[in-house]
C-alpha cells in the first residue's frame, strides 16, 4: 500500500538557519502531496500542497517541490524562526490519506 | 480556519465507562474522519464517513463505533473505555476524497 517516510528528528536549529525535512513516498499513480504543521496543543494545519509532478507548493516561506522521478517532497525554508518550532507531517492522498510519522523541529534563539 | 468543533476538548473517564466524542463542522463537507494520535504511532485512522449514515472502518477501529445522522455531526463512541484508548483524538473533514483534509483542535481523553 501507499506509504510516507520522513526523518523523525528531532531536528534542532539555530534561528535563521536553513531547514530541510526530507519526505519520500511510495504510491501507485499520481498522489497529491501535502505538508502539515502541528503546534503544541493544537490540531494539524495545512502548510502547503502540490497535486502534480514538478508543482511547487509554498506558504509562509516554506517550499516543497513534487519530484516524481525521486518520489520526494522535501520541505525547505531559507531562514527559520523560533516560531517555526513545531511538528511537521508529510502526507499523501492516493487511494486515501497517508501520513508520515512527523518530524519535530526546535528552533533556538 | 475550517469550521470544526470537537467536544469535549478534555475528558478523564474510568475504565469500562462509555464515552462519546463529538465533531461538528460548518463547512458542509462530505467526508469526515476520526484519527487518534499517540507517541511512536503517529496519526492512525479509526473510522471515516463519506456521507450521512455512510461510514467505514480505518486501521484501528476495534473498540470504537461511529455514527453520522447529519452532514455536520460525526460521533465517535468508545463503548467500554480501556486504558489503551488514552489518546488525543482528532476529527478531520474534506470536501472530496482527495482534496485537502482539515483537522479539528483535538480531544484529549484519559482513561484511568
Image: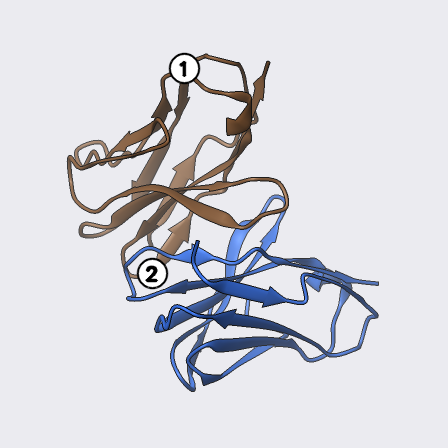
Q: Is residue A55 above or below residue A108?
A: below
- Residues at marks 2 and 1, CA–CA distance in whole angstroms: 32 Å
Q: Secondary structure at mark 1?
A: loop
Please report the residue visible at 45 percent of the width from the left and 84 percent of the height from the top: B70
Q: Which quadrant of the structure image shows residue B96?
A: bottom left
Residue B109 falls left or right of residue A108: right
List the residue tagged with mark 2.
A96
Q: Is residue B81 left or right of residue A76?
A: right
x and y percent of residue B37 in the render? Answer: 59, 53
Residue at 29% over, 31% down: A64
Could you tell whether B92 is left or right of B94 in the image? right
Q: Quadrant of residue B80?
A: bottom right
Q: Residue at x 17, y 37 (%)?
A: A55
In the rendered image, residue A106, in percent from the top left (x then y), is placed at 57, 24
Q: Secondary structure at mark 2?
A: loop
Q: Position of residue B108 (x, y in %)?
A: 69, 58
Q: Is residue B19 above or below residue A77?
A: below
The location of residue A19, given as percent across then percent down, is: 42, 20
Within 10 Å of disc 1 (Cα), the crowding (few <14, some 14-19, many 20+) is: few
Q: Which residue is mark 1?
A: A18
Q: Is residue A82 above or below residue A37?
A: above
Q: Colour of chain A?
A: brown
Q: Colour of chain B?
A: blue
Amino acid at each position: 500500500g501507499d506509504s510516507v517516510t520522513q526523518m523523525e528528528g528531532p531536528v534542532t536549529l539555530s534561528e535563521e538557519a536553513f531547514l530541510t525535512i526530507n519526505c519520500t513516498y511510495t504510491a501507485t499513480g499520481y498522489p497529491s502531496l501535502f505538508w502539515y504543521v502541528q503546534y503544541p496543543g493544537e490540531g494539524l494545519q495545512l502548510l502547503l500542497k502540490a497535486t502534480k509532478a514538478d508543482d511547487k507548493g509554498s506558504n509562509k516561506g516554506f517550499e516543497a517541490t513534487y519530484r516524481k522521478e525521486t518520489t520526494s517532497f522535501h520541505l525547505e525554508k531559507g531562514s527559520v524562526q523560533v516560531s517555526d518550532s513545531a511538528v511537521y507531517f508529510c502526507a499523501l492522498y492516493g487511494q486515501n490519506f497517508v501520513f508520515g510519522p512527523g518530524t519535530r523541529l526546535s528552533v533556538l534563539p | 480556519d475550517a469550521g470544526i468543533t470537537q467536544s469535549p476538548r478534555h475528558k478523564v473517564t474510568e475504565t469500562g465507562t462509555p464515552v462519546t466524542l463529538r465533531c461538528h463542522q460548518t463547512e458542509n463537507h462530505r467526508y469526515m474522519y476520526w484519527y487518534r494520535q499517540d507517541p511512536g504511532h503517529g496519526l492512525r485512522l479509526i473510522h471515516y464517513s463519506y456521507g450521512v449514515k455512510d461510514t467505514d472502518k480505518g486501521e484501528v477501529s476495534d473498540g470504537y463505533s461511529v455514527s453520522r445522522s447529519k452532514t455536520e455531526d460525526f460521533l465517535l463512541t468508545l463503548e467500554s473505555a480501556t486504558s489503551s484508548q488514552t489518546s488525543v483524538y482528532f476529527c478531520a473533514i474534506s470536501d472530496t476524497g482527495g482534496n485537502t483534509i482539515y483537522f479539528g483542535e483535538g480531544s484529549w481523553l484519559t482513561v484511568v
